[in-house]
C-alpha cells in the first residue's frame, strides 16, 4: 500500500534531483520519472485563481511510471502547490496516511521539517474526518506584508469516492499548499483546500487559465 512521502512539498522536487533519489516513509526508493514540463492548462486538479495567476512553473511527473505528481511554484513568499494522485480503481492511500493527514502533531511536524513557514501556526484548523472524502489541516498566518496559508489535505476522487462516502474510504489524492497574498486570495486557496475538484472539462479549464494569465 502506498505511503506518504517523508519529504513533502518543495523538498519533493528537490529530492527528485539528488543522486540517491526520493524515498517513502519506510526508506524505500521511489521512482519518479519526469514526463515533461507541461503548461498549467494541463493540470489535473482545478486550481484556484491565485495559484494560476501567480504561477512561475508547472511540472508533471509520474511516480513508478503510473501515478501523477503535479507541482506549481508561485512567485510570492516561496509558495507552492503539490499533489500526489493515485490512478486506478484500487489505488488508495493507506489508512495510516489518512491518520497522518488528520493528526495535529503530524501536521505541525510536517510544516517545521520542511521549513515551510516561519509563521505562527496557532490558528490552525482541522476539517473533515476519517469518514469524509475531503479533509485535513490548514493554518493561516501573517508573514511580512502578506497573508499566508499552509495546508496539507486529502481528497477522494473518482467512482470509489462517492461510493465510499461515510464509510471511511481512504484518499487517492494528497494536496500540499503554501500561498501568500492578500486576504481575498488566501480565502480562495482555503476554499480550494476544503473542496478540491478534478478537471473534467478540459476546454473550460484551458479558457479559465488563459483568462487569468492574460490579466
Image (cartoon, rainbow, N blue to C red):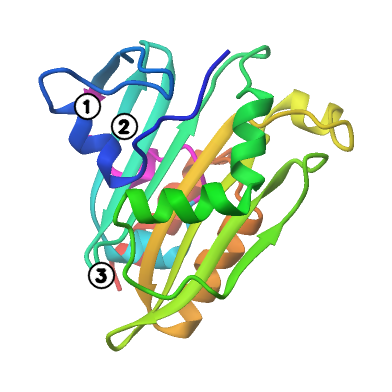
161 to 10, vertically: above or below: above
Task: State the CA–CA distance, disc 1 to disc 3.
Answer: 26 Å
Q: Are marks 1 and 3 in contact (CB under 8 Å)?
A: no
Residue at image mark 3? 77
Seen at 60% across and 56% down, the residue is 137
Residue 212 pos. (x, y %): 37, 66
Q: Which residue is mark 1?
A: 36
Q: Write the residue at 53% across / 23% down.
A: 86
- Name the element at disc 2: strand
- The span picked out in magenta is 35-46
Point out residue 78 in the picture as x, y percentages from the top left corner: 24, 62
Q: In the image shown, does 32 or 199 lie closer to the viewer?
A: 32
Q: CA distance from mark 2 to mark 1?
A: 6 Å
Q: Does residue 23 lie above or below 213 as drawn?
A: above
Looking at this view, is 48 or 101 the one in front?
101
Question: Residue tagged by mark 2?
Answer: 60
Q: Position of residue 56 (x, y in %)?
A: 20, 56
Q: Are marks 2 and 1 in contact (CB under 8 Å)?
A: yes
**In the rendered image of this protein, does residue 4 appear above or below residue 123?**
above
Identify the residue shown where x is 30% and y is 13%.
Answer: 31
Amino acid at each position: 500500500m502506498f505511503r506518504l512521502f517523508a519529504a513533502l512539498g518543495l523538498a519533493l522536487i528537490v529530492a527528485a534531483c539528488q543522486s540517491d533519489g526520493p524515498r517513502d516513509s519506510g526508506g524505500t526508493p521511489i521512482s519518479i520519472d519526469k514526463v515533461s514540463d507541461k503548461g498549467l492548462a494541463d493540470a489535473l486538479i482545478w486550481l484556484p485563481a491565485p495559484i494560476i495567476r501567480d504561477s512561475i512553473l508547472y511540472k508533471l511527473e509520474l511516480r513508478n511510471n503510473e501515478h501523477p505528481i503535479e507541482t506549481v511554484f508561485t512567485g510570492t513568499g516561496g509558495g507552492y502547490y503539490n499533489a500526489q494522485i493515485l490512478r486506478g480503481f484500487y489505488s488508495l492511500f493507506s489508512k495510516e496516511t489518512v491518520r497522518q493527514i488528520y493528526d495535529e502533531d503530524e501536521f505541525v511536524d510536517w510544516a517545521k521539517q520542511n521549513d515551510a513557514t516561519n509563521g505562527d501556526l496557532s490558528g490552525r484548523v482541522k476539517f473533515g474526518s476519517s469518514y469524509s472524502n475531503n479533509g485535513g489541516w490548514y493554518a493561516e498566518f501573517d508573514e511580512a506584508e502578506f497573508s499566508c496559508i499552509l495546508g496539507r489535505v486529502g481528497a477522494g476522487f473518482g467512482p470509489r469516492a462517492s461510493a465510499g462516502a461515510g464509510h471511511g474510504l481512504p484518499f487517492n489524492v494528497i494536496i500540499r499548499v503554501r500561498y501568500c497574498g492578500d486576504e481575498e486570495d488566501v480565502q480562495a486557496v482555503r476554499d480550494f483546500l476544503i473542496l478540491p475538484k478534478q478537471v473534467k472539462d478540459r476546454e473550460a479549464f484551458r479558457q479559465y487559465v488563459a483568462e487569468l494569465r492574460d490579466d
